């Protein structure tokens, strides 16, 4: 670790020293704009355009230029630029993102659970993370809002919001093509074209394709996993017949066809479950030997008993229309529709031992949303008010087999249908006091009603004693409806519904004590709807889980200033959150009254926890050609009271109080630089960028199982950009990701609390690539 830190610090030191030499040789700032030159960043954290430094909200904005400099190809790449943000695969499903922000995380993307961090694409709420990771093309910006979003944005969230803004059409013909090639074997392109249709209508078409040979080799059955084969396209139509009216239509689609996510055995804990039957069955399957065989393989090699695969299609359409009634009053309407179709199959124990498999999972969902806003300015008061409606429905089907026969266990068809409806009214305002230095008070209020419906259709399939080891649902056996209380006659199914409502709010003040410096104080309340566990079987687990609520207290400072003749900036925030009725999904082993052991998924409300921490983003420009960057986040998230329900006994018999939150790294940080190395006689320039990123280990399971956590990791990325080579308008980039070829765990499946098994996902190896940006027309 010390060596890696030394290497990263040395890179920065060399860059600083070389930049000083370049400055001494040039004697003056470059005449052309530099990559390190300050850019004015505009955000929409309060649903209207404002300067980043004027917004009393903890928000990190990554602009299109920053995305290009960091070679961002997927949305998960953005986490290396944002303090306290972590994105991992959800349930080992390719192309699906589980987002963690300030200790808030929901890794299950099924329809019966809401995410802790809301995703908004062009202001339209995206309820599920399938396909979102590949939306990072032809973007205007990515904004990450931290803390509860319980007032201004469509759905209440406890952790924050991720705002994706795609590029709108220009009024002149133009565009770009950006192909790239990488080693290990990878290639792709993205591009866009502006098509002005009339003087008041324009169209922008954008496309993205990504290919990567899988870096995980499946040794025993052949094939590769962790590959990439993805297509995406987007059409944006902008209508602007006059200065008062604007309407933008966006239609996009995404398709994925890949070999699935590589799963590696991480830790094996014999007897952890405390049940001799389970332990004996795992041993009889030869798992200890299979585990040892997996551990003996190379870092990017694994075994499997099932050929994995992932398929996904998404479609979305949205419209945003604004009309300026007058200079002080604006009406805005946002409507969206989207569908998701996905299928996956995967060997989840990461060995040849046939212990557990996701033999087939199917997801089919669609959603519709409508939001009407009225924005206005009345003297010193700026305000926004509106109404929001959201409806989502679909199903999730998973066939699993745990501890395969003829030992013990059975097929399980976890099948459930759900529908979510949300309605809300909201208002938010900011009032400027009549003081010499700008001082503002602000407050907001939202009332939300949520209705959750679920149809439990799960079945257990008990095989015959002679059943072979092939997971074939058609094999003779006894099919039993696992939804307790389902009618004896007729199809398997049990319909349940529940209503929830909440009032959420925020209040605060800010003070601009210097032209580019702002201090603020805020208190906010966030809420996440209750619902049902679609995998519930017993009567107690079929009861709805309660909503969770969080109250967040925060102070922040944003400042840009001069120090010793150098331009510098500092944005920081510290927070304390009181978190109640926390929703958690737990997989555990229970012993039924008959003496049989069964693996169950329970969804419970942990009583309480506190989350506290802070984020810092700072930069320094010692000379015009060089900009240094630093970021750091600290998150302390532990349960104060957490008892896990046992459906076999009807009691909370497992005390998990004091455990750390899963998916939350206590310390995250990074250092980086952008250095304009040279300005060439032909008008071109060379720019060198580098980033050193650090992440603490984090737990993979809310029941902190020994060995079920990631590693400490240091990642170094670098790029060399040649702008306008040989007098052309092109840009050539040589980039390296994971420069030190760090071997690190990026996430995993922690099944230790039920099956003694803890499995991991391995991060990508070093990637070296070359890209070429070719603009044309007015681009």
Image (spheres, grey):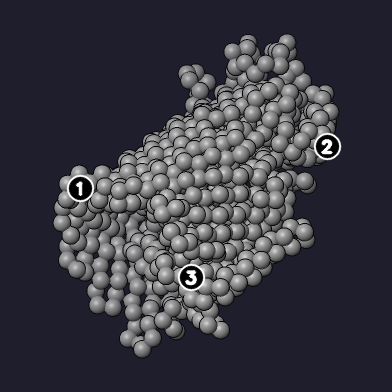
Q: Tell me which residue sits at (46%, 53%) in the image.
A: 725
Q: Is residue 129 visible?
A: no
- Which tag, 2 or 3, sits closer to the chain's start? 2
- Which tag, 1 or 3, sits closer to the chain's start? 1
Q: Dot 1 surroundings within 10 Å: few (below 14), some, or many (20 or more)?
A: some
Residue lying at the far front in this picture: please name it: 681
Q: Is residue 626 visible?
A: yes
Residue placed under numbered mark 3 in the picture: 523
The x, y position of residue 671, in whole percent, is 62, 63
Residue placed under numbered mark 1 in the picture: 201
The x, y position of residue 232, in whole percent, is 42, 37
Q: Nearer the viewer, mark 1 or mark 3?
A: 1
Q: Dot 2 surroundings within 10 Å: few (below 14), some, or many (20 or more)?
A: some
The x, y position of residue 756, in whole percent, is 77, 37
For the residue labelled by badge 3, is the local secondary structure a helix, a strand or a loop? strand
Q: Is residue 720 left or right of residue 355?
A: left
For the residue labelled by badge 2, is the local secondary structure a helix, a strand or a loop? loop
Residue placed under numbered mark 2 in the picture: 271
The x, y position of residue 152, in whole percent, is 38, 60
Spatial CA span between label 2 and label 3: 47 Å
Q: Which mark is residue 509?
A: none
Q: How many marks?
A: 3
- Residues 744 and 651: in front is 744
């Amino acid at each position: 670790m010390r060596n890696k830190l030394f290497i990263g610090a040395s890179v920065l030191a060399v860059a600083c020293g070389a930049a000083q030499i370049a400055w001494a040789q040039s004697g003056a700032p470059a005449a052309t704009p530099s990559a390190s030159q300050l850019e004015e960043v505009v955000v929409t954290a309060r649903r209207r355009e404002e300067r980043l430094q004027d917004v009393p909200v903890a928000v990190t904005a990554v602009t299109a230029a920053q995305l290009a400099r960091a070679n961002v190809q997927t949305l998960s790449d953005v986490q290396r630029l944002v303090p306290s943000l972590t994105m991992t695969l959800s349930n080992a499903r390719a192309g699906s993102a589980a987002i963690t922000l300030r200790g808030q995380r929901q890794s299950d993307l099924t329809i019966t659970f809401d995410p802790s961090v809301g995703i908004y694409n062009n202001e339209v709420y995206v309820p599920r993370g399938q396909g979102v990771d590949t939306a990072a093309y032809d973007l205007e910006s990515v904004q990450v809002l931290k803390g509860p979003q319980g007032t201004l944005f469509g759905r209440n969230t406890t952790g924050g919001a991720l705002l994706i803004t795609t590029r709108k059409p220009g009024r002149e013909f133009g565009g770009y093509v950006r192909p790239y090639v990488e080693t290990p074997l990878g290639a792709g392109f993205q591009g866009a074209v502006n098509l002005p249709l009339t003087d008041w209508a324009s169209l922008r078409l954008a496309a993205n394709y990504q290919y990567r040979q899988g870096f995980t080799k499946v040794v025993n059955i052949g094939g590769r996993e962790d590959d990439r084969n993805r297509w995406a396209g987007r059409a944006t139509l902008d209508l602007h017949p006059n200065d008062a009216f604007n309407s933008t239509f966006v239609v996009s689609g995404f398709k994925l066809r890949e070999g699935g996510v590589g799963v590696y055995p991480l830790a094996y804990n014999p007897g952890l479950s405390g049940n001799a039957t389970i332990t004996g069955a795992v041993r009889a399957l030869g798992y200890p030997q299979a585990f040892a065989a997996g551990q003996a393989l190379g870092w990017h090699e694994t075994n499997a008993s099932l050929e994995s695969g992932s398929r996904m299609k998404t479609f979305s359409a949205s419209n945003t229309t604004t009309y300026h009634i007058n200079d002080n009053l604006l009406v805005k309407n946002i409507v969206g529709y989207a569908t998701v179709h996905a299928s996956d199959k995967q060997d989840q124990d990461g060995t040849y031992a046939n212990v557990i498999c996701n033999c087939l999972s199917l997801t089919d969902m669609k959603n519709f949303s409508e939001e009407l806003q009225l924005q206005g300015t009345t003297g010193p008061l700026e305000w926004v008010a509106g109404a929001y409606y959201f409806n989502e429905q679909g199903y999730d089907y998973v066939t699993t087999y745990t501890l395969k026969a003829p030992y013990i266990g059975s097929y399980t068809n976890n099948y459930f249908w759900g529908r979510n409806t949300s309605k809300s009214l909201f208002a938010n305002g900011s009032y400027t006091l009549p003081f010499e230095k700008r001082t503002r008070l602000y407050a907001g209020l939202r009332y939300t009603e949520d209705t959750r419906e679920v149809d439990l259709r799960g079945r257990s399939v008990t095989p015959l004693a002679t059943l072979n080891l092939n997971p074939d649902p058609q094999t003779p056996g006894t099919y039993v409806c696992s939804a307790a209380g389902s009618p004896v006659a007729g199809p398997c199914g049990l319909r349940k519904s529940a209503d929830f409502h909440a009032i959420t709010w925020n209040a605060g003040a800010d003070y601009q004590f210097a032209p580019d410096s702002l201090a603020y104080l805020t208190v906010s309340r966030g809420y996440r709807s209750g619902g049902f566990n679609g995998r519930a079987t017993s009567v107690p687990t079929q009861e709805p889980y309660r909503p969770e609520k969080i109250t967040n207290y925060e102070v922040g400072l944003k400042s840009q200033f001069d120090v010793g003749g150098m331009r510098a900036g500092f944005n920081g925030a510290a927070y304390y959150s009181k978190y109640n009725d926390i929703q958690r999904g737990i997989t555990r082993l229970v012993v039924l009254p008959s003496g049989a052991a069964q693996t169950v998924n329970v969804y419970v409300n942990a009583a309480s926890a506190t989350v506290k921490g802070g984020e810092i983003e700072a930069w320094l420009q010692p000379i015009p050609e060089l900009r240094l960057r630093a970021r750091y986040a600290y998150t302390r998230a532990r349960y104060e009271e957490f008892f896990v329900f046992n459906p076999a006994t009807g009691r909370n018999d497992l005390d998990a109080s004091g455990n750390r939150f899963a998916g939350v790294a206590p310390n995250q940080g990074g250092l980086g630089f952008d250095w304009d190395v040279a300005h060439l006689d032909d008008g071109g320039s060379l720019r060198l960028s580098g980033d050193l990123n650090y992440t603490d280990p984090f737990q993979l399971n809310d029941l902190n199982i020994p060995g079920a956590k990631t590693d400490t990791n240091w990642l170094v990325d670098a790029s060399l950009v040649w702008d306008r080579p040989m007098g052309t308008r092109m840009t050539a980039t040589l980039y390296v990701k994971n420069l030190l070829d760090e071997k690190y765990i990026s996430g995993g499946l922690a099944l230790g609390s039920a099956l003694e098994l803890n499995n991991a996902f391995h991060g990508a190896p070093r990637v070296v690539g070359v890209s070429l940006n070719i603009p044309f027309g007015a681009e």
